Image (tube, rainbow, N blue to C red):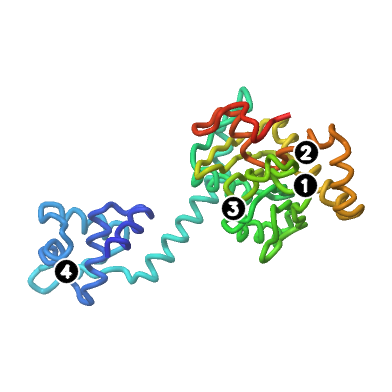
Amino acid sequence: MQDVVEQLQRLGMSGYEAKAYVTLVGAGQPLNGYEVAKRSGVPRSMVYATLGKLVAKSAAYELRGADDTVDYLPLPPRSLLERMRREFDDSIESLEVSLPVIVASPRAHLIHSLKDAEALLARAEDVVAEAHTDLFLSIWPEEMERLSPLVGRAVERGVETAVVHFGSARKPVGDFYEHRFPSPCATTEEQQGQAGPDHRLLVVTGDRRETLVGGFSGGTAWGVYTEDPAVVAMAVQYVRQDIALQIIADRIGHQNMRELCAGDPELRRFLTGHGCATALLNAAGMPGHRPGAPDGRLL
C-alpha cells in the first residue's frame, strides 16, 4: 500500500489524497468519512477536506443516502490511470510548445560536473534518449548493460549509431566495433595492471550537439556534461578515430599493428593509456588519484 501511495504522490496527489483513494479502492464498498479516516490514517479533522479534493478531481464520487448521509466511491483505478496519462501527455505537448519560448539563449556554453555513477549514467541516458540524428559512444560492458535498451530504441527510430565497445557484447547494437587494439590501458608492460573494468572511460555524444565524458575508477565515478561545440567536436573525433584504429588493425592484422607500435616510440607514447579512465582521473586530481602518476598520462 505504501508503494502505491508514493507512486500516486509522484503523479500529483497529496499524501492524504493518495491514502484516502487507496483506502476507498481497497474497501470494495462505499465508505463514509469516519471509516476512511479510521482505515487510512488521514486525521479526522482533514478527512472531509481530503475527500472533497478527490471529488473535485473526479477521483471519487459522493453517494448521498435518504437520511442525507454521504458515502464515497472511488473512480476505478483503470479509469484514473488512463485519465492521468491523458493529462500528463497533454501537459507534455503543451510544454513542448511553450517552454522553449521562454528559454533565454545561454551567454556561454557551460560544463557541469557529475559527481557519482548514478548521476553520470542518468545523464548518459538523457543524451541517448534525446538523440534524433546520430550517436557516438565509447563504452564498456558495465555501462552498456544499462544503456543498451535506450541505444537499441535509438537505432530503431533511425538514429545513426556508432559504438566502440571495450570487449565483446551479448547483443551488439548500431554500427558496433569491438575495441581490441591496443589492449585498453595496457600498451606497455608496466600498464598491464591497469587494464580491466575497474578503470573505464565513458563517452556519449548525441546529435553532435551535446556530450558526456566520464570515468569509473576504483569504485569512484566522475564526469562532465556540456553542449560546448568544441568539446562536442573533440568527443566525436575521439570516438571516430578510435573506430578507425580498430578498422586499420583488422585490415593489416593485429600482429603487424603491434610490431609497428612496438618499433615506433612515438606511436607507443601516444597510444599508452588510450581508452583508460585512470589518466583522466589523475589529471583531474580526483580523490584517491595522484595527479601525474605514472599509471596513465594525458598527452
Q: Quadrant of residue 208?
A: top right
Q: Residue furthest front?
A: 189
Secondary structure category for the residue under label 3: helix
Task: Please give the name of the residue rendered at 10% of the width and 68% of the height, measured from the top-left corner.
Answer: 68
Image location of residue 207, percent across then percent down: 71, 44
How far apart are the alpha carbons under marks 1 and 4? 73 Å
Q: Residues within 10 Å of mark 3 (few under 14, many from 20)?
A: some
Q: Residues within 10 Å of mark 2 (few under 14, many from 20)?
A: many
* In contact (CB < 8 Å): disc 1 and disc 2: yes
Which residue is nearer to you in this view: 10 or 135? 135
Q: Residue furthest right?
A: 252
Q: Earlier in the sequence, mark 1 or mark 4?
A: 4
Number of marks present in the image shown: 4
The disc placed on residue 271 is: 2
Asked if one can make out residue 105 in the rendered structure from this viewpoint, the answer is: no
Amino acid at circle 3: Glu
Amino acid at circle 2: Leu
Amino acid at circle 4: Asp
Task: Please give the name of the residue rendered at 60% of the width and 40% of the height, measured from the top-left corner.
Answer: 214
Secondary structure category for the residue under label 1: loop
Q: Earlier in the sequence, mark 1 or mark 3?
A: 3
Task: Please give the name of the residue rendered at 35% of the width and 69% of the height, measured from the top-left corner.
Answer: 77
Q: Nearer the viewer, mark 1 or mark 3?
A: 1
Q: Quadrant of residue 276?
A: top right
Which residue is nearer to you in this view: 292 or 58? 292
Image location of residue 162, percent across then percent down: 75, 52
Residue matched to label 3? 143
Image location of residue 204, percent across then percent down: 66, 45
The disc placed on residue 182 is: 1
Q: Nearer the viewer, mark 3 or mark 2?
A: 2
